Amino acid sequence: QKEVEQNSGPLSVPEGAIASLNCTYSDRVSQSFFWYRQYSGKSPELIMSIYSNGDKEDGRFTAQLNKASQYVSLLIRDSQPSDSATYLCAVNPGNSGYALNFGKGTSLLVTP
Amino acid sequence: DADVTQTPRNRITKTGKRIMLECSQTKGHDRMYWYRQDPGLGLRLIYYSFDVKDINKGEISDGYSVSRQAQAKFSLSLESAIPNQTALYFCATSDLTGYEQYFGPGTRLTVT
């Protein structure tokens, strides 16, 4: 079983702070990594994808990937109450181009 | 209009009944997926399809069947519903790389 691990939280940060969400994965040959945001009762929404080591920035979001450590993270700068949601880490294994393995998600609460 | 639609959005049914959940997409994607989401268990893959002639079992296919009627339509059936199939069901699509998956709004199914 390919594992994708996330701290379930809740992670609570004050408005304007940086929220740091972490994810580890067990399949060393994994090639593609994704972050989804899911509001309560809604569907997951793709917010970031990252395929190579290093940082990828998109607006207030930065994804970081370290394949040697099998670690991927999401930073949210200037956190807003509207960022309060569950963030799902997903990993596409290297030996299949189809299935995503999802972590169980980290609940983020941004307090005004 | 939404790119991925699911019907019904909510359904309550009784144990032993047959039920079909439908998914349609206008994204032009070849690959389609069915997931279920349970509290504390995350998203789990039920079935996936690369094209109309290709259907594959996912992690938890027992008790489910699928039909790919066209490139744009992928249906999930519960032949004889049981209470532990109560969950939130999501359809997703991706292009041929399978890297980025896009989710429909979900169907909340309750089996009594």
Image (cartoon, rainbow, N blue to C red):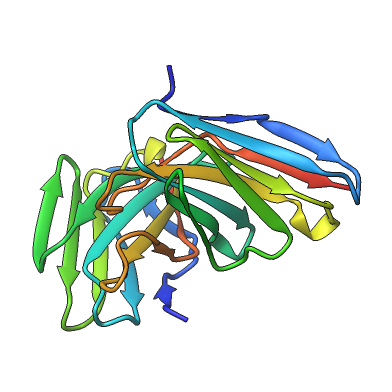
Residue at the front extreme?
A: B53
Residue A92, located in which quarter of the rendered image? bottom left
> What's the residue at 37%, 61% (across, down)?
A89
Q: How many marks?
A: 0
Residue at the spot 75% in from the left edge and 49% down from the top edge? B78
| Up-down relation of residue A70 to residue A65 (above or below) | below
Outermost residue, top direction?
B1
Decide if residue B25 is on the left or right side of residue B85.
left
Instruction: Decide which of A96, A11 is in the foreground and name it.
Output: A96
Which residue is depicted at the point 62% across and 66% down? B60
Closer to the camera in the image, A47 or B35: B35
Quadrant for residue B37, please give it: bottom right
Residue B83 placement (x, y as % from top left)? 84, 56
Residue A95 as seen in the image, left or right of residue B83 = left
Q: With A69 as the anchor, is B90 left or right in this view?
A: right
Q: Position of residue A38 (x, y in %)?
A: 46, 45
- Residue B77 against residue A11 in the figure, above or below: above
Quadrant in which the C terminus of chain A is drawn? top left
| Place of residue B22 in the rendered image (x, y in percent of width and height, measured from the top left) | 61, 34
The foreground one among B89 and B69 is: B69
Q: Residue at x 32, y 80 (%)?
A: A27
Side of A44 relative to B57 (left or right): left
Quadrant in the picture for residue A70: bottom left
Nearer to us in this view, A52 or A77: A52
